Amino acid sequence: MSDGEGPLLQVAGATRYYGARVGCADISFDLWPGEVLAIVGESGSGKTTLLNCVAQRLDLSAGTVSYRMRDGAMRDLATLTEAETRFLARTDWGFVHQNPADGLRMSVSAGGNVGERLMAVGERHYGHIRDTAIDWLGRVEVPADRIDDAPRTFSGGMRQRLQIARNLVTSPRLIFMDEPTGGLDVSVQARVLDVLRRLVSELGLAAILVTHDLGVARLLADRMIIMKGGRIVEEGLTDRLLEDPQHPYAQLLVSAILTV
């Protein structure tokens, strides 16, 4: 079955408990190839717990997450071996952290950070790795003459753009983003968002974006889920939900961005 014939990802009844406390409860949604889904809510709403469960960084207490592999087969991710999960994370998926230091090797050169991901999928030709790294630095607006500099010498925005390049160089089909502009100044945020929006569109990426910022969701996402207390309170197409939210909590969030 080709990508066009079904969802890329299916989440059914996803639930995660921390002892007696609910992290997220009974979450279900499909993600289609090339679609960007925003998971929105305030701190403590369960959005990051849900993201980490879907990305296989946390185990579910109940429910399933299924993914369409490149051969077209839909696989329950809980049934993959550890090696299969690791390979998926290195090749078909990307994960952009809020803090770039969590997604980069800070003492390795910028080119090395991009090149490592290529080597993880079998690339061994040094010249090709370096040329690809230079190309990707350009695509995320990092000057090519910084290729041999370590990320610890970069600004926050440049580190975040480098993390994006490291994640996208292997042509993944799905990228997870956890507050990708959360720690940045507003002007720097805009540049990172512009890079993300352009690359997601150019590459036809599917993405799950966690954010507390409805402005970021409005810019990047086709569809939106709003969470409160670990549960979905409203979901729908981004434009429609922002224009006419139905749930009182969603109305409160939307009115907050309309008044700034």
Image: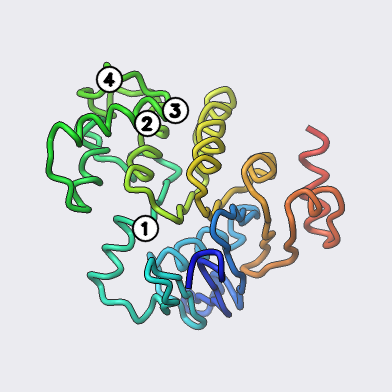
Choose the circle earlier in sequence order: 4 or 1. Answer: 1
Q: Which residue is mark 2?
A: 159
Sequence-wise first label, 2 or 4: 4
Disc 3 to disc 4, how far (Cα)? 14 Å
Type of amino acid at the residue the image marks with label 1: Asp
The spot of residue 109 in percent (x, y) is 21, 30
Quadrant housing residue 232: bottom right
Q: CA distance from mark 3 to mark 1?
A: 25 Å
Residue at image location 32% in from the left, 29% down from the top: 135
Q: Which residue sits at x=52%, y=65%?
A: 50
207 sits left or right of 233 in the view: left
* Pointer 3 with pointer 1, Cβ within 8 A: no
Q: Secondary structure at mark 1?
A: loop
Query: Which of labels 4 and 1 is toward the front?
Result: 1
Q: Are marks 3 and 2 in contact (CB under 8 Å)?
A: yes
Residue at screen point 82% across, 38% down: 258
The CA distance from mark 2 to mark 4 is: 12 Å
Counting residues from the N terminus, which is met first, the one under dot 2 or under dot 1?
1
Q: Which residue is mark 1?
A: 92
Q: Position of residue 208 (x, y in %)?
A: 54, 55
Q: Nearer the viewer, mark 2 or mark 4?
A: 4
Q: Which residue is mark 3?
A: 157
Disc 4 target residue: 146
Give the CA separation, mark 3 to mark 2: 5 Å
